[in-house]
Image (cartoon, rainbow, N blue to C red):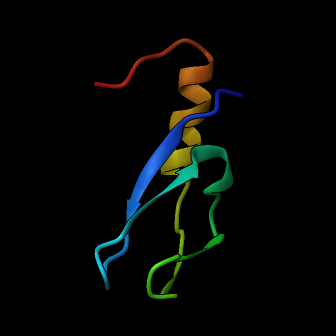
Amino acid sequence: MADIVIDITCPVCGKVFKKKAKDLTDGSVLKCPGCGEQTTIRGTMFTDMDKSVDKGKTWE
């Protein structure tokens, strides 16, 4: 699987941090390294994108 890295912006403090798309599965919890706010990922948008790119598709 391609290692697509996605910038995540914390909705509380605005800190931008990076996560691999393959790690952003439905139900996974992200914790902001700045303020500690936790957010639960819903849906498979990031992992679907990662799989599509791995198969040679492009995103515009």
Q: Foreground residue, 49 or 35?
A: 35
Please identify the quarter of the rendering in which residue 56 is found. top right
x, y percent for residue 35: 44, 87
Above or below residue 9? Residue 14 is below
x, y percent for residue 28: 66, 70
Q: Quadrant of the C terminus?
A: top left
Q: In the rendered view, does 23 fall on the left or right side of 19?
A: right
Mark count: 0
Furthest residue toward right:
1
Q: Residue at x 63, y 33 (%)?
A: 3
x, y percent for residue 55: 61, 16
x, y percent for residue 46: 51, 47
Q: Quadrant of the N terminus?
A: top right
Above or below residue 47? Residue 36 is below
Q: Residue at x 62, y 63 (%)?
A: 26
Q: In the rendered view, does 57 fall on the left or right side of 2?
A: left
Q: Residue at x 46, y 47 (%)?
A: 6
Above or below residue 9? Residue 24 is above
